[in-house]
Amino acid sequence: MMTFDITILTDARYVNPIEHNAYTGNVLLEDSLVQKALELKGFKVNRINWDNPDFDWSQTKSVLFRTTWDYFDRFAEFSEWLKMVEQKTLLINSKELIYWNIDKIYLSELNQKGIRIPPTIFVDQGATETLQDLILKSGWEECVLKPLIAGAARHTYRVSLNDYLNIVPIFDELIENEAMMLQEFQKQIETKGEIALIYFGKEFSHAILKKAKAGDFRVQDDFGGTIHDYVANEEEITFGLNAILACPELPAYVRVDVIWNNEDKLCVSEIEMIEPELWLRKNKDAAGKLADEIEKKLNKKS
């Protein structure tokens, strides 16, 4: 007999956090909303850090990725753990989606299927082109440089031919070990911000507007970004749904981040289906909708 139906995954910092602030408070609140919604359906639920060495992963029917927000800083370790745990239990979202979503090369696949993304140059690990070569090749006035595997704006830089020299040694070190991407800078990120569209299955739940602090372009709260209530319109909701339908399979939960490009058209900046922040606290029905989708996945599997 399995001990748990579902194990909610977090990282060790959020199991019993020493420092209690608004950030950790929101993490604990969001995870508790999910746990309560699942328990209301009769599931036996556990919550632990993904790298817990003492937990027997065969003792849970499924694992739900929620606040594993250190995985991209420990990617080699996380990859080994993922290979192990996928043999022992069901991953939600699925292992196929997780592997697909880890590497932002998926943006190229979406673009090939007609989903608009910012103009992008993908740079293979070990590439010999210099950063200057790449900026010249792009022909763009300003660019954003970032790794293909990252989160929380890790090693994300705004560069141009007039201002890139200080990034050269960072780029040279990074490209030896990982693939990178260079995107044309989309200016409206500074004025309009970025919409986060949250879906459970095909059903749209709610949206959030993320805005960078003055003088920055990164909307993450790590860099002073703020979130605001937002009512998405039909065009935005449909655009996000079309992006989801272009993915390899339908996720139980997903966040589609959308910005306005330099032609004032919607484009996908990224799709998050591994451990997205979902702002469940902003919609009283969201945790229940997530629980509904998880129940469908488990019933389909059994």
Image: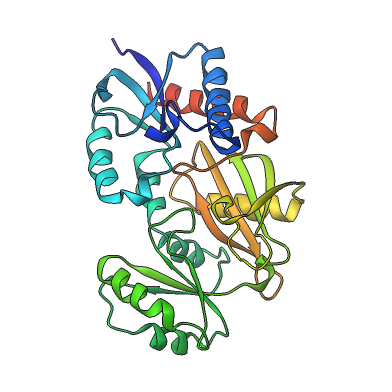
Q: In this rendering, would 81 be left or right of 136?
A: left
Figure quadrant of the C terminus: top left
Task: Provide residue 100's location: percent of width, then percent of height.
Answer: 38, 52
Task: Provide residue 114's location: percent of width, then percent of height.
Answer: 55, 65
Residue in view at x 65 percent, y 59 percent: 212
Figure quadrant of the N terminus: top left
Residue in view at x 43 percent, y 50 percent: 248
Judge whether 36 appears above or below 201 on screen.
above
The answer to which image quadrant residue 142 occupies is: bottom right
Task: Provide residue 36's location: percent of width, then percent of height.
Answer: 56, 18
Residue in view at x 60 percent, y 36 percent: 22
- Which one is nearer the viewer's eye here, 235 or 156? 156
Judge whether 17 appears above or below 216 on screen.
above
Is residue 292 in view? no
The answer to which image quadrant residue 155 occupies is: bottom left
Judge whether 63 appears above or below 166 on screen.
above
Task: Provide residue 268's location: percent of width, then percent of height.
Answer: 58, 60
Is residue 262 in view? yes
Q: In this rendering, would 168 be left or right of 188?
A: left
Residue in view at x 50 percent, y 48 percent: 272
